[in-house]
Image (cartoon, rainbow, N blue to C red):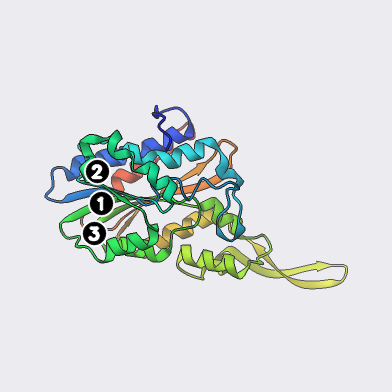
Amino acid sequence: MNKTQHQFGGSWTDEKLERVRKYLVAYAKIMNKQRFRFAYIDAFAGTGYRATKNNADQDGLKFPEFSDKETKEFLEGSVRIALKIKPRFTKYFFIEKDQSRFSELEKLKDEFPQVSSDIVLVNSDANSYLKDLCENRRWDKNRAVLFLDPYGMQVSWKTVAAIASTKAIDLWYLFPLGAVNRMLTKNGKITSAWRAKLDKILGTTEWYDLFYKSGEEVDLLGSRPVVKKIGDFDSIGKFFVDRLKTLFPGVAENPYPLVNSKGSHLYLLCFAASNPKGATTAIKIAQDILKRRSDGN
């Protein structure tokens, strides 16, 4: 695990992490005055899904833009930020599938002894554990902020639906915008494996008709049918926000696009609130935090 202390206000990494930190601070202050127990959950707490040699997702889809050093720092920084928030959370759940990364994660209890007894480390698949946590635990007296920060396209829409069903969890989701766009080939010829992954992460097959347009192309040999990609980063992002609205009573209208130092789109930082009573306040805070500054950050 990267033990470098982040000084906010420098790189894009620090700027985006600061947005998450601001929400956690506001959330903890509000919940500290309520009767609920409240937790912070990091679904990909280690770097097991990220530190691959060729930066490839399953099915061989390579993402060279994820090799950027700042990208890795951002993805690894949320755990320690949450552990430093005052007032503190009641519990901390850190989920990591990879055993070697999980072993590094275990050192957190020594690094943060003041909260060590309330750190729950889970060596498991994030989708499986989250579905069980959401569907088989009582949430009437519990609340949580969950950070979904996958390396690629590991998160299932069924997991997102389970989170919404709790009516108790505020969700920050680093939606893999760059990976989704990469799979949407220009000619519309998408392998069955890639289609399955897109269906799984978006929870529907409707995306194809929205991101592609059928037509005809005329050349010296006459006309022939063609399929062209019309989906871009903006339309993909809007589609995903609309998908979240089918599950959550509150969804931030201004998700924040993350690009690396080379200008490559990586993620869309999205926010959704599952509790009907608290959604209005949560969305107000999140949308203010997600506003872009005049300097472009």
For marks 1 and 3, the one nearer the N-term is: 1
Q: How many C-alpha atoms fall within 10 Å of the one at disc 1: few (<14), some, or many (≥20)?
A: many
Quadrant of the image occupied by residue 135: bottom left
Residue type for callout 1:
Ala
Relative to 279, residue 47 above or below: above
Q: How many C-alpha atoms fall within 10 Å of the one at disc 2: few (<14), some, or many (≥20)?
A: some
Q: Viewed as shown, does residue 30 lie left or right of 255? A: left
User: Rounded to the nearest whole Å, what is the CA distance between mark 2 and mark 1?
Assistant: 9 Å
Relative to 122, residue 292 above or below: above
Give the residue number, with chain letter if any, for mark 3.
276
User: Rounded to the nearest whole Å, what is the CA distance between mark 3 and mark 2?
Assistant: 16 Å
Q: Which mark is residue 108?
A: none
Q: Viewed as shown, does residue 133 lie left or right of 231? A: left
Q: Nearer the viewer, mark 3 or mark 2?
A: 2
Give the residue number, with chain letter if any, for mark 1.
144
Q: Viewed as shown, does residue 288 lie left or right of 73? A: left
Residue type for callout 2:
Tyr
Name which residue lies at 28% across and 62% down: 134
